[in-house]
Each structure stands twice: as structure tokens, then as C-alpha cells.
Amino acid sequence: MRKAIAATTTALLLVGAAACSTSESSSTDDTKTGPAARRPITAGSAFSDVSAKVSTAKKSGTVTTANDPNHLLGRPNQYTSKVTFTDTRIKASDVSGTEKGAVERGGAIEVFADASAAKGRADYIQSVTKAMSALAEYDYVHDTVLVRVSHYLTPDQAAEYKAAADTLK
């Protein structure tokens, strides 16, 4: 009987401690609780939001450390998640010979730990491709998200991705 009472008392103390810590954290950090709680953004969730607004975008792959052609996933100051997508408005003949997941086929979404890393990556890509028009792309940064879009899309078509990226939360 004593063991049962002790176990019950311990359980009640743990439940009480958990309840106290929950109320303390909710009063100091509103981003973790309530109906408006912000979900952690990933490349997958960002793509879901973008593709809801750009219906021609179709997910083509999820980049992992095993298949990342750039070997950047998870590295210091690099993307923490990445997906690739195609855009049905791009002609197959324009992208024949490119690898699956190539930005030319539609684009990619990369998510970073902080906004400065996302901007740094976009700036790097723009500086590298500036002299090589065949590698040019549209790059849109919204907070920690970099949306990379194929140069085979017209400026108006690419602007749809910018508008979608600007609504990411």
C-alpha cells in the first residue's frame, strides 16, 4: 500500500511540475503555444505553401545528405532542408540533358537557420552566375527561405514564385 501511495504521490508531483512549467513558458514565449503557434518552416512545408499558389510547380525531390549534389545540407551556414521542383510551363526540350532536381527544370527551395545565411547563399549564386547566362536563375529570399527559380520561366511567371514566397510564414 505504501508503494502505491508513493507512486501516486510521485506521479502527481510530476504532473504538477509539468503543468507549472507549461504555464510559465506560455507566458514568456507566445510563439510556442496557442492557435497561432508558428510551425517550424522546412523546405517541404514552404513548397506546400508555394505550390498552393503556383499550380504549375510539382515537387520532384527531397535533398538529403546522401543525395545532395552540392554537399551543403546541414553544413555550417548552409541550408537545413531543400526540395526541388519542376514547372510544367518549361519545355522538356529546353531541359533535356539536365539532371533530375536541376534548378533549370523548375527550381528549388532551400531553408536556412537564419535570414543572413539565406541572403548570403542567394548573393553567392547571383555572383557566380552573373557571367554565365546559361546558369542564371531568379532568386527570392523571404526570411530564412530561398526560392530558386529557373531562367526558362518568363519574368512574369517567375514573379508568381516571388509573390508566393512573400506570403510564407
Image (cartoon, rainbow, N blue to C red):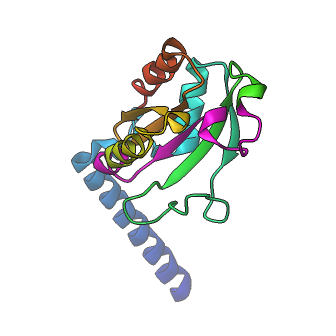
Q: Nearest the camera: 15 or 8?
A: 15
User: Residue 5: x percent and y percent?
Assistant: 50, 80
Asked if residue 134 is positioned above or below residue 42 in the image, the reply reads: above
Left or right position of 62 against 75: right
Toward the front, the furthest residue is: 131
Toward the bottom, the furthest residue is: 2
User: Residue 109: x percent and y percent?
Assistant: 53, 40
Residue in the picture at 41% in, 46% down: 128
Residue 138 magenta-highlighted: no
Asked if residue 119 is positioned above or below residue 2 in the image, the reply reads: above
In magenta, the rendered stretch is: 95-118
Residue in the picture at 60% in, 24% down: 152
Left or right position of 38 against 161: left
Asked if residue 6 is positioned above or below residue 32 in the image, the reply reads: below
Q: Nearest the camera: 41 or 130?
A: 130
Left or right position of 37 against 61: left
